[in-house]
Image (cartoon, helix red, strand yellow):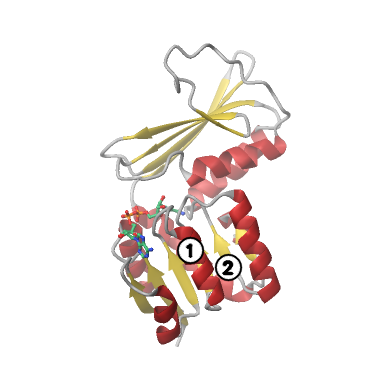
């Protein structure tokens, strides 16, 4: 007996880590593993999965979330690439159905704490830039975590103009989300890393987080699988269930 969980994206690096973690987690039962070629809707129905964990890719995630919600299963979504408007649409759908779920750009406890503290700091240090570093197999840039960080910083920082030096090579100053520059580095050897650098008067303040192994995301994923069963809404960000 336990909560019946299906993992979608089972062949991937995160999918594999989830399968191991769920099999070892008291209170959770792994009832299905699906890959790109599988019929997700049929698999949810046949396995009677209550929760579906999705770690696939940015192209597939929109359709997957739709299928999971329509099947009446609780979505636990770690895949990056969803836009805020799409998240809001899924929230409205889940609200109507009173279906609990979570979309979390990052399931690591350390990252969530870093973002929470950064949000407080942004009130006093409005000049801020983000550097995110990931393995070179990551398909999307910037990372979902960096985008979410910028969104959270924007909620508390007083609007400030980032000084624009002329870019002699386009892109030199990074991308911009909520007027916060984000710089993305992709290299073999990295896993998932982020720095938030605040600049003040004669001082800088840097927050840094390193996920050195994918197991760092698993306590958050297992917690989410249990917590979504008690929710009647779709939350965005792990911080809402801690
Ligand atoms: N939220 C978090 O904490 C967190 C942490 C790490 C990675 N991620 C994100 O999770 C996603 C997966 O990362 P990864 O490193 O495991 O990537 P990966 O490339 O190793 O795995 C993705 C897998 O999904 C499969 N896939 C693609 N489309 C599919 C579909 N329609 N149905 C089923 N499977 C499908 C691929 O074949 C592949 O096996 C990425 O978007 C990444 O950014 C999120």
Residue sitting at 51 percent across and 65 percent down? 65
Q: Is residue 46 above or below residue 145?
A: below
Judging depth in this view, the residue of 211 and 6 nearest the camera is: 6
Element under label 1?
helix
- The picture quadrant where one finds residue 123 is top right
In the foreground, 219 or 174: 174
Quarter holding the C terminus? bottom right
The number of numbered badges drawn on the structure is: 2
86 or 31: nearer the viewer: 86
Residue 29, can we see it? no
Residue under label 2, please give it.
Answer: 101
| Mark identifier at residue 63 | 1
Compare marks 1 and 2 and give the one earlier in the sequence.
1
Q: Is residue 73 left or right of residue 34?
A: right
Residue 182, percent from left and from top: 50, 31
In the image, residue 48 above or below residue 81: below
For ligand 1, the image quadrant comes to bottom left
Which is more toward the observer, 171 or 158? 171
Respond yes or no on whether mark 1 lies under 8 Å from ligand 1.
yes
Residue depth check, mark 1 versus mark 2: number of the one nearer the observer: 1
Q: Where 93 sits versus 191, above or below? A: below
Q: x, y percentage for residue 46?
A: 40, 86
Q: Residue at x 49, y 21 (%)?
A: 173
Q: Residue at the location (44% across, 19% down)?
A: 170
């Amino acid at each position: 007996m336990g909560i019946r969980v299906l993992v979608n994206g089972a062949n991937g690096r995160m999918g594999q880590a989830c399968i191991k973690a769920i099999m070892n987690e008291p209170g959770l039962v792994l009832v299905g593993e699906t890959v790109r070629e599988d019929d997700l809707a049929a698999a949810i129905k046949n396995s009677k999965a209550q929760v579906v964990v999705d770690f696939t890719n940015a192209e597939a995630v929109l359709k997957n979330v739709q299928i999971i919600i329509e099947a009446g299963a609780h979505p636990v979504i770690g895949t990056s690439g969803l836009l805020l408007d799409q998240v809001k649409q899924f929230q409205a759908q889940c609200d109507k159905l009173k279906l609990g779920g979570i979309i979390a750009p990052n399931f690591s406890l350390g990252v969530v704490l870093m973002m929470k503290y950064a949000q407080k700091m942004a009130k006093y240090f409005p000049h801020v830039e983000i550097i995110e570093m990931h393995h070179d197999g990551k398909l999307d840039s910037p990372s979902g975590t960096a985008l979410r960080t910028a969104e959270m910083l924007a909620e508390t920082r007083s609007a400030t103009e980032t000084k624009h030096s002329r870019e002699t090579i386009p892109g030199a100053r990074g991308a911009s989300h909520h007027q916060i520059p984000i710089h993305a580095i992709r290299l073999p050897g990295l896993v998932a890393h982020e720095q938030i650098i605040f600049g003040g008067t004669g001082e800088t303040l840097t927050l840094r987080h390193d996920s050195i192994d994918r197991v760092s995301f698993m306590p958050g994923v297992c917690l989410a699988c249990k917590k979504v069963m008690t929710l009647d809404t779709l939350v965005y960000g792990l911080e809402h269930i801690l």
